[in-house]
Amino acid sequence: MTRTAASGTGHGPRRSLLLLAIASSGFLGPSGNPPDTRFNDPLVPDTILTIPSGPTLILEAAAGIPAMGIRVSVPLDPVWPAAARMLVEQALDRAGNRAAAIGAEVWGGIQDGRIVFHAIGDARDSDELAWVIRLLTAEPGTIGTAAAISRERARLDQLAETPRGRLLLEMESRVTGTGAGNTLPAARAADVHAMWQRSHARDRMRIFVLGDLSLPWVLADLSRIGAPPRSAPEAPYLPEPVRLSFPESPLYSWSAAAFTLGPAHDPPVLAAAAALRAGLRGIAAANAAVTVLDGPADGSGWIGITARATRSREADAALNSALELLTEEGLDAWWAQGAAIARSDFLAAAATPGGWMELSDRYFSADGTTSARTALNRLSALRRQDLAPVVESFRSTLFHPRLDG
Amino acid sequence: MHPRWAASSTRPYCNVHLTSCLVFFTFCVLKAPLFVAFRTNSAAIRLSRRLANAAPRRSRGSRGFIHRLLGTIALLIGVCVTGATPLHPQAGRADSGRGRDSPLVLARGWSPVAAIAMALPVSPGTRRDQLLADAYDRALLAAMREATAGMPVQVTYGSDGAGRYFVVLTDAAALPSTLDAIQQSARAGPPPHLVDEAVEGITGDLAFRANLPRSRFEEVLNEHLWGRARAGTVVPDPIPFDGLAADARATAAAPPWGPPVWVLVGGRTTGASSPGDSAGPAGADPADSAAVSADGTVPEPLYVAPAGAARREPVHAEVPSDAVTRWVGSVFRFPAETTLIEAVTLQLVLEESLERQRDPNLFELTTETDALGRLVVRYSTSIDAGQGWDSRLDATIAELAAEPGGVLLTQALRPARSRWSQELSGPAGAVRAAARALLRGASDKQAAAFANSAEEVPDAARIRAIAAGLSLSIRVVQGGG
């Protein structure tokens, strides 16, 4: 019965879906939260509904909030950030005008290993916001694909021109599993469409709705967006990589390292990354400049460090002194500060509808064991012992890419 | 009673939070009474007043008195010269029953984060007074950050034409201790070493940018906004740096702006629990509903412009410049009996309308409603396109005012409404809005209503009427003459 309703079209099935939702929300899917936490904590979703062969709907019913937000996230499948960027760019092009007409904030990108869109606007514009979301998640057309491919290629060339860009490409190539950073697969129109079919399959979609809305509205407007569910997905396909040239830097010597401290948004990892940044600000590297950059937003938490100096030995020395921070003793001095920064960043994010939805989606688990609240609690109770796995992850993933020539 | 300020029965949260739990929270945890007098015979309110009166108050020296006196005189002179609308201390602060340091509390049952705002009025004084205010704010921000180091908070600072805002975001569980730390820091004022650091920072910044054309334009526009400049060509004075550090220390010891206003948005979590937590959906706070029904009144409208404000010939001033960018500041008076929410909506509508006409020649565009209740539009353009944008601004206002109404207003009103909803949906935006109203002399209920005014945005007909009543007061142009 549920399957029929979910895949139907027209008013009849839509009405039956509404009735079904009202009558059977208790058995359509598991509700993740135990009764004692269902309301009164905004960092724990009110309602979680998993529709068979349909999306997981998460509703934070914030009665009285003047704005409303809808966030859709789908898995990054295959893990190919370049193709996902093109998919997102086309989606934003499709929905931009409609969002501007109602003054909605619309955003798309890759976060935590998922392709994410959100639209936030006035609570009275809920139907238009749902329309914007439908446009964002619609099947990509061929119009505009060539321009998106050109822009992505230009972006890769631009990154290849600078050492920091090259480090980012090196980390991206680790994520896609395609070898060295100067060989990355170049997406074509067909690849973007194939990625949409895989990643946007309805049953892989997670929809988070924040606002003064009822569950029937959410079901009626959002339960059938995206691609049809797929029973047996094919193995991901990555085309032949293109080779980028890394020119030698004429002025400086560069030294670089890349590593991951663990899953990007694990509370100890957040605190350690903030501690690392705070510690690096305190390092006085003679004749060298040290910078930190985040890797691809695939959730694996890659971090890169570059050191730039006129002599290679000075660049190496600066990088080594930066990496010395990544021991339990080195991080310990900055641990309290890092934890405080991570907590305040968390709060600043939760203070906006977009950030609130992001946190709820990021720490969501279908069985209700984790939520944004549990993450905040962990951030508030970090101990020095939490450093050990972070340092171990650093040691096991550290590599030194060559950025010159 | 202004019809647009009728309370919405569907939005019981749109009112000030006064509950038994909050009273308990206030007295037992915050130790700083906070109140909105819905029920004036409440024993809790009487107790709150007693506590407020018993609270230690900072004595102010004669220097502070002189600063305040001079500031007031400068403001009055400015008002007289420009014909601008003064602030309207309406029924206001005196009817609140709150102590001086007691925050106005807004209910946001659905908010995952609590927020505190401390706001000070903009400095109406001379350039040097403004530097002293900048130094004070920088130093106080640093002091607040030091005071809350290690606590789960984020302290930010921002200013607009109406006020200077210190906004603190915190976990609801840590709200009492955070408020305590922030208020202690504000009462103590910034320590001398932070004031010195702030002065050093400002001096360093100005050494770089004081002579840039943009800074000179802002300086001249500011002189006009506060009524200290005359029409015609104006050349800004050199910046008075002598003895700045000593004066900044003295200002920090006795700030001349009067007491700050405090606003608080509390979330509802396990950390700040209340009896209402266990019943009803999140956000539908039974305590709010009770408070509204017991009171049964809606606040008086909060006007930015009084009835019968005299129109004067606009002041045109030109600042000589050989820069390749042209800066323009236009100041408009609102028509009589324009409320704050109407002024803000018109400001947003105008900004949206101008943004829709943006071209590569427009570099920057900002709009604000200033402390004297005027609409200030600033933009910078390329020299060649500058005069075209002057006429575009005037034509846009005329189109917004046109009967029976153009497409522009229809197109811009919805995005403006959406922006205001998004602004008020976050705790930081809500506390800032309430603080902004309090700085204009609003009563607590008016301030709370303004912070919950997303549904009270005026309709197109009212916006059209206000646009028709806008009158140009000052236009300062730098470059391209």
Image (tube, coloured by chain):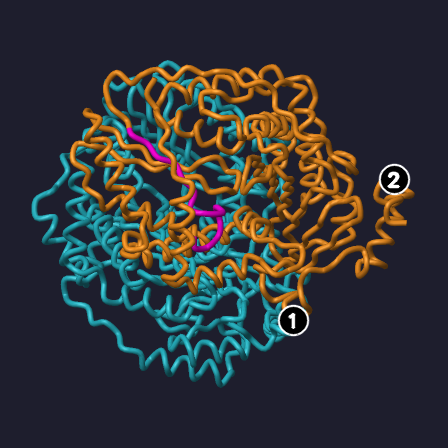
Which is nearer the eye, A351 or B250? A351
Residue A36's disc is: 1
Q: Is residue B439 visible?
A: no
**In the figure, is residue B49 to the left or right of B110?**
left
For the C terminus of chain B, the image quarter is top left
The residue lying at 63 percent from left, 72 percent from top is B286
Q: Is residue B185 visible?
A: yes
For the N terminus of chain B, the image quarter is bottom right
Asked if the residues shown at circle 1 and circle 2 are in contact, with their CB atoms under 8 angstroms apart, the answer is: no
Which is nearer the eye, B356 or B372? B356
Which colour is chain B painted? cyan
Kind of residue indicated by mark 1:
Asp
Disc 1: host chain: A
Which colour is chain A painted? orange
Find numbered disc 1 in the image and state the secondary structure of the residue it sits on: helix
> Which residue range is magenta in the image?
A255-268
- The residue where tag 2 is placed is A8
**In the figure, is residue A99 to the left or right of A251?**
right
Find numbered disc 2 in the image and state the secondary structure of the residue it sits on: loop
The residue lying at 43 percent from left, 50 percent from top is A269
Is B279 magenta? The answer is: no
The residue lying at 77 percent from left, 48 percent from top is A219
The residue lying at 70 percent from left, 56 percent from top is A48
Pointer 2 local density, CA inside 10 Å: few below 14, some 14–19, many at least 20: some
Which is nearer the eye, B85 or B366? B366
Kindly report the distance in space between the C-alpha atoms of the residues bearing marks 1 and 2.
Answer: 36 Å
Is A262 magenta? The answer is: yes
Where residue A37 appears, x then y in whole percent?
A: 63, 67
Kind of residue indicated by mark 2:
Gly
